[in-house]
Amino acid sequence: MNKFIVRIGVLSLFALLDTNAVHAQSQEAEKVGLYITQEMSFLNMTTTQAQQVYQINLQAANAVENLRQNSNVQQIGTAENIEGFTDILKQRNLAVQEILSPVQFQLFKENKIIRAATFRTIVMAKMLDLTQDQLDPVFEINQTVVKNVREDLDIYFSADNNRGKRNAKRKLHKALKKTDKAFDNVLSPQQTTIYHENVDLLRNVLREEYGTKDSF
């Protein structure tokens, strides 16, 4: 199923939603939810599945926005933020599992690069208020980032002791640091500043989604 077909299936959902519910949703969350659902077209979802997965992605985008707002108000630290994002990730993956067939979900689970790039894009979209035109290049950069550090990620998650994991983590962060400049040509100066202020969080979001196991 190509992105155009997925788009038709997802957009048809709006005709079924209660008007008040539609207005209650953030337009930014709707944009992100639709985009992420389109990027999952490799799963060859039916129209019904695409509609249901869109709802899940929309809820995840709204949850990320709520977490970000609460973090600003309550001055929540990075560790708590990572835990919050990881919980959203787990809930999203569990919900997606309920919709997909076993074959589809196995494909989703195995495609670590798209999974990690997708969730990082969700977080960046809400954190940086990405425009529609920025979503594609940001998603592509995130995919490239994961591909470039995949070996380091695999080493990190295969480390069998704390010392090995710490060494692998330092090497991974060094590799990720080299990729940060790729966003400079896509983001505005203000967005770039926010990105670099939250760069450790965004690196951890990518790492956690790539290696998450207990959400399946």
Image (cartoon, rainbow, N blue to C red):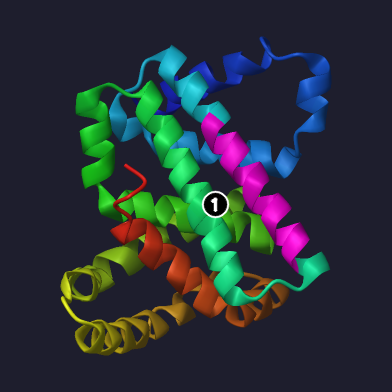
Q: Main secondary structure of the magenta part?
A: helix
In the image, taking residue 168 as reference, residue 57 lies left or right, namely: right
Q: Which sits in the foreground, 135 or 197?
A: 197
| Element under disc 1 | helix
Query: Where's residue 168, x and y in %?
Result: 24, 84
Q: Quadrant of the N terminus?
A: top left
- Residue 132: image location, x then y, percent: 62, 47
Q: Based on the picture, tell me whether residue 89 belongs to the magenta stretch.
A: no
Whether residue 43 is situated above or below residue 81 in the rendered picture? above
Q: Which residues are magenta?
A: 56-71
Front residue of 134/166: it is 166
In this rendering, would 84 be left or right of 91? right
Res 136 visible: no
Q: Position of residue 50 (x, y in %)?
A: 45, 22
Q: Which residue: 70% across, 60% down? A: 68
Residue placed under numbered mark 1 in the picture = 122
Residue 54 on image: x %, y %:
53, 29
Amino acid type of the residue that numbered disc 1 sits on in the rendered structure: Ile
Picture quarter containing residue 105?
top left
**Which residue sits at x=19%, y=81%?**
161
What residue lies at 37% left-to-right and 46% top-to-bottom?
Answer: 215
Local crowd at mark 1 within 10 Å, few (<14), some, or many (≥20)?
many
Q: Is residue 66 above or below residue 166?
A: above
Residue sitting at 28 percent across and 87 percent down?
171
